[in-house]
Amino acid sequence: MAAAGAEAAAAAAEEEEAAKRRLPPGADPESGGDSEDEADSDSSGDGEDEEKENEAEIQRLEEQLSINAFDYNCHLDLIKLLRQEGELVKLRRARQKMSELFPLTEEIWLDWLKDEIKMASESSEREKVYELFERAVKDYICPEIWLEYAQYSIGGIGQEGGIEKVRSIFERALTAVGLHVTKGTALWEAYREFENAILETAQPAPGSVPSPEQQQMLCSQLERIHTLFRRQLGIPLLDMEASYAEYEEWSEEPIPETIIKNYKKALQQLEKCKPYEEALLSAETPKLAEYQAYIDFEMKAGDPARIQLIYERALAENCLVPDLWARYNQYLDRQLRVKELVLSAHDRAVRNCPWTVGLWIRYLLAMERHGVDHCIISEMFEKALNAGFIQATDYVEIWQAYLDYLRRRVDFTQDSSKELEELRSAFARAVEYLKQEVEERFSESGDPSCTIMQNWARVEARLCNNMQKARELWDNIMTKGNAKYANMWLEYYNLERAHGDTQHCRKALHRAVQCTSDYPEHVCEVLLTLERIEGTLEDWDAAVQKTENRLARVNEQRAKVAEKEAALAKQEEEKAEQRKQARAEKKASKKAKKNRIGDKRKADDDDEGEWGREEEAEQPSKRRKGDGDGLLLEEDMELETGLFGRSAPEKPDCPANQKQKASTSRKDIPKVLHDSSKDNVTVFVSNLSYNMAEPEAKLKELFESCGEVEQIRPVFSNKGTFRGYCYVEFKDEKSALQALGLDRKIVEGRPMFVSPCVDKNKNPDFKVFRYSTTLEKHKLFISGLPFSCTKEELEDVCKAHGNVKDIRLVTNRAGKPKGLAYVEYENEAQASQAVLKMDGLTIKEHVIKVAISNPPLRKLPDKPEAGRASQFAAPRQLYGARGKGRTQLSMMPRALQRQSNPVAKAENGMVQNSPATSSEPAEEPKKMSNADFAKMLLNK
């Protein structure tokens, strides 16, 4: 207590002294901050305002950390601000809290150590710095920190045992990073300089004769330096040639052959390592592929020290990559098996990636494997529960791993023990935890099949011979919605079969027959098999009656469902027939009207020449409006004219016609069909504005950046108006592939869709959606955004929680925002932190929802059977690569799209085989002759 009080008093005094030393921003240290003129007064006022803002920000960050202590970026911001303000005591406290939760990076440790070194003057303060260095070198293997540690220890050489302490630190540093190809040389040279300095101090004065003790000390010191040179020359390091030349110059004796041989061998090994080192130097972060190649190279060589070092180098730059930690820990667990090294790596892994349940499970297994105390393992498990996993199933996995560990501690030869009671208590707590904590957070327990309760029942039945408790657990499992599944009943039945009795087996199967809804036939078969082997005649009769009644009810229910589906199919057929008749009537009326118009025009044009009649035959029928020079022709009906429409005669350039001048001029373009053999050099462009003027010129200017454009074929309607899509044909395939990068580019206020030109009739499975539709833990899905929110505004909000790689605002076909966005971070850690901090955030009076991107699976329609496709499948439509849009009209007359024999459609629109109908297609009734009809009447 006295020590604690003294420590608190010292901390208070230190804080008071720091407050005295700290000057407000902008103050003059010579004058104590007094201002002599108006400019100095303004500067002092600005400094005070800035200081107040910083103090408010510090308070806000501290409050945020009190809510979420695992906010990594918040820790960094607080430390940076406190260091800027000179709040030394608060800064030390903030660094201490962060180091307890996370391993600190090399930069943070070096800043912290340099600040502490500046303030350490007494020997007691130096010991605290030594302790800080010891903590720093355990987080990551960093040559710079080891070098700083060794150089700082030289300052205490005057203390008792100072020289030996410095040597001990240098030796540990060489063991840790002395093999570092690019940075190890600095440590070796620093060590040699230290020993050379000691050699200089041990030299006798000029002209004096050294005593035997001095001579012995000189010889031993020279031998130390020789040994350092020889050790270094046997390791592949950069600038080995310079070290060898230095040794030749320094040594008075010739270099031994063994040293030269080891040096040449190290040079050869260095040449093998150089390509990997050069790849790391030229690569951009995170360099995972380059590091993995280097690791594979060292794994083949098989030197454990070098393998460990390259793993540590990779982790220092990729500390938030769970897979890398998992591979490193697996190597240590299976190959090195050194307790301190293995447990240290596991501890750093879970501190860097606390959201990864697999790392926690491996840590618990490693602690059990190396005989760590039970209380420590239990504490580590409690930390895992508070790590903030991102899926409900993660909590099921960590609980199962801990329960497995507790089960292995129990001696089941005893009827009762402390370990067994602890195991049962843990099972009960796990079930309650999933029900309360996990289900409240994720709206699901993560364990719908009750696997933990199933394992509990197995332990009770097989290991504890407590079948009564196992039955209670299974009864609880069935009440949680699992009674309708046959596999759950059969699992229980197998447990009863192995450890129970026939009576309970029979009872379980009778309940299964009554409750199962997915595979009742299978359960009935198992019951009959049981009674056939072990049952009496009465048991057999009861089982047969029960199974027959159950299957009769099941078949009755299935028949009702089939009847209902058949009725729906019939209704669809009737509706299709009605639509067919309506279309036929409409078509007949249009045809009659067209014939009347054609007859009238023919009568009006009888006096025209042959050329006039030929031209009239090529034009769609028109009706006139107005008179004089302002005649305006309108199409009476839309005809099928292919891709580019028909040509039209020139119209006078008058105000009434200026609006249609551009469109009518395009009617002279000859019809050009799409050549499917050039699909590999063609892209399909859609969702363009219908009002785009001169689309050929506009798109050619846009796509010329991708390569030489061979042809642009915009698609026009009969009236000559642009239909919003076109084909762009390039000179070569490379340009077409490059043009796909312009997909979603905004053109005249709309996102332009650019996709490969693919015939979906020949490639029905082709998809052009370029974004992932699976779980992406490094990407966020944000909903509820205001429509006015821009990409830059959203990036300002998101980048506070990590490095944002990409932001995509979801828009409709018109380019209007839908209030949704996808934000991609560099790694899973930043994404998970952003979810915790941004979910429920208010942006422009809109509360947003943030979650890990995991799009729901799209329901894909079932493909019709090949043998029935020609008779029952609907005619394939000639849509574009993106499918038929909502506003896209079919260019095929509706009369040609109808099926001759309409069939029933299921809810998703695909053809379904109704149980009530035959599996073979219905044959058309055979036409009967008069003789056949007479025979039919005579037979009656």
Image (cartoon, rainbow, N blue to C red):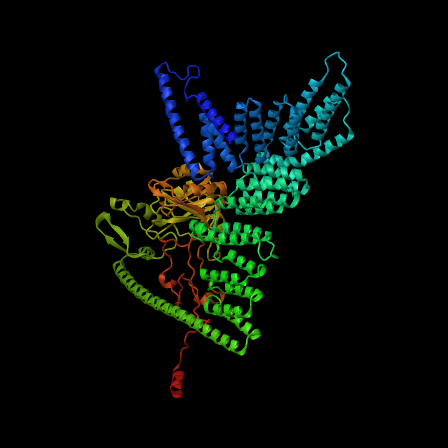
- Residue 104 location (% of width, % of height): 53, 34
In the picture as drawn, the residue positioned furthest to the left comes out as 627
Quadrant in which the C terminus appears:
bottom left
In the picture as drawn, the residue positioned furthest to the top comes out as 207
Q: Residue at x 36, y 18 (%)?
A: 41
> Is 150 placed left or right of 489 in the picture?
right
Q: Nearer the viewer, residue 796 or 548?
A: 548
Q: Is residue 476 above or below residue 523?
A: above
- Residue 500 location (% of width, % of height): 56, 66
Q: How many marks?
A: 0
Q: Nearer the viewer, residue 528 or 497?
A: 497
Q: Nearer the viewer, residue 357 or 233?
A: 357
> Is 286 placed left or right of 926 in the picture?
right
Q: Residue at x 64, y 46 (%)?
A: 334
Q: Residue at x 25, y 61 (%)?
A: 600
Res 586 quadrant in image: bottom left
- Residue 709 location (% of width, % of height): 46, 43
Q: Is residue 409 above or below residue 133?
A: below
- Residue 367 location (% of width, % of height): 59, 45
Q: Nearer the viewer, residue 917 or 177?
A: 177
Can residue 928 be seen from the camera position used here?
Answer: yes
Res 413 quadrant in image: bottom right
Q: Residue at x 21, y 50 (%)?
A: 627
Can residue 786 be seen from the camera position used here?
Answer: no
